Structure formats: C-alpha cells, structure tokens
Amino acid sequence: METARTDDRNRNRPGTRSGTSALRHGIRVLQTFTREEPILGVSEIARRVGLHKSTVSRILATLEEAMLVERHPTSGRFRLGVGVIALAGPMLANLDVRRVARPFLEELTRATGETTGLLVWSEGAAISVEQVASPKTVKHTIPIGTQFREHASASVKVFLAESPPEEVQKVLDRGLKRYSERTVVDPEEYLKGLQRVRELGYAVNAGETSLEETGIAAPVRDHRDQTVAAVLLSAPYYRTPPERIEELGELVRKTAEAISKRLGGASA
C-alpha cells in the first residue's frame, strides 16, 4: 500500500507530468509516419500533432540522436530510422528482406556450421536484424540490434564499398583506429581493400577487429540494384585458415546473390 501511495504522489509531481507529456509527444511524432507518407517535414508533423514547430524540432533532434528518425539525404525531411529495429523485435517480421533472407541464412549455417546474420545500414552503422546461431559450442554470435561501426568490420566494408566517395571520405577523415595488429589503418591501403571487396563480391575481417574472430560479408541488392542489406558469417579465427576463408567467402557471396534474386535484384 505504501508503494501505491508513493506512486500516486509521483504522478502528481510537476516534473513527472512534464516527463510523461514529453514522452507522449515523442510517441505522437513517431506515429505520424505511415506507409503512405513515410517522409515528413517539421511543419507537416507540427500540424498533425498540434505542437509548435520549435517543439517538434527539439523532439526530432532527440529522436535522431537515438536513430529513431533520420533525415532524407536529399530533401532534409524526416523518416523513421533503423534504430526502431533495435527496440521493436516484432516489427522485424514485417521487413521483406529479413523474411526472404531467413531460410537462406539457415541453409548457410547448416552448410558451414557457423553463425550467420543479416545487417542493414543506417547512420554509419551496420545493424543486425536477423541471426542464425552456429550449433557449435564455441561460436560467435550476432544478436539482433548489434551495431558495427568499426571500419575494419566485414559488414561495414561491404556497405562502404557501395557508398558514395564522400561517405567513405568521412570515415577516413575521422581516422582509422587500430583494433588489433591486423587492422588496416593506412587510408590508401583501406581504399584498395574496398576495391577488392567490389571485385570479389564479399569482404573479409580476419582478426582485424578482434584476434579471435573472422567475419565475412556480402551485399544484398534489391530490384533497383541498391544495396539494402548484407549477409554476414561470423566464426572463431582458429576455424578460418586462408583456404577456408576463400571457400566461405564464395558461399556467403552466393547466399547474398540468392537473396538478391528473390528481392528482384539481378543475379551475378
């Protein structure tokens, strides 16, 4: 009973009411985005939620920091961000690419015995939206919602290899951090590596972010030939000698191509 009385008092405090109101406003802003109108400007949102433009701008800035919304690259208007995926597991079932990819990932894990996953790109991060864990006792996993930002990550390499030069330059301008003795930190060498990714059709991270792990990733393309996701295979480093990396790379590439074909993309 004491807890209930305390909660009642808390609900009546001005600060609590203000926080609840701000949360409610934030939810209403998110709910203005629909399938029919996925991209909206500040003025449009303000009219729909009945708030001043300055208030909506502050809410959007907070949501943008959390990757719950993002700016459209050309119009500067807003749309829902991939950060929503990390919060809303049930929403993943509605992603066509995830639904299409799942059986292919399961087959890749069966064929290799290693963990596989599907990642999408948002605001400089590769975000896991699906995983099929290895059946082995010793394994690496890719939990849903995991974000990879390291330039040496295989999935990040895949997305950067498909990105405009100015996006790649932003990464280089921030500096290439050394994560292990195998990390590539020379900009010219890194750019050559991205070209190699384009030539091979897959990227490799062989102990570059961790000496204990190997990652291999390949791009998934849709009917517009746009890279919409990446297939990632993650395995302990000791199970991936050079000759096996080439074999796994081809399997990952073919899996990504099969998913692309199902999405209407051209097969290689």
Image: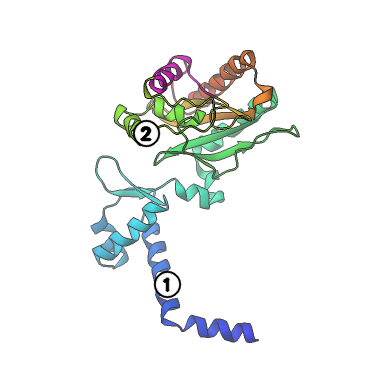
> What x and y, as percent, mark residue 125?
44, 39
Is 143 left, or right, of 192 in this rendering?
right
CB of mark 2 within 8 Å of CB of mark 1? no
Mark 2 nearby-residue class (10 Å; few <14, some 14–19, many ≥20): some
Range of residues picked out in magenta: 189-205
For image coordinates 40% across by 72% down, the residue present is: 21
> What x and y, as percent, mark residue 25?
37, 66
Provide the residue designation for mark 2. Answer: 171
Provide the residue designation for mark 1. Answer: 19
For image coordinates 60% across by 38% down, the residue present is: 142
Amino acid found under the numbered disc labelled 2: Val
Residue at the limit of the structure toward the right, as seen here: 137
Camera sees residue 37 = no
Give the CA distance from mark 2 to mark 1.
37 Å
Local SS, label 1: helix
118 up-or-down from 219: above or below: below
For image coordinates 36% across by 29% down, the residue present is: 163
Residue 195 on the magenta span: yes
204 up-or-down from 209: above or below: above
Q: Main secondary structure of the magenta part?
A: helix
> What x and y, as percent, mark residue 207?
58, 27
Q: Nearer the viewer, residue 174 or 169?
A: 174
> What number of labels is visible?
2
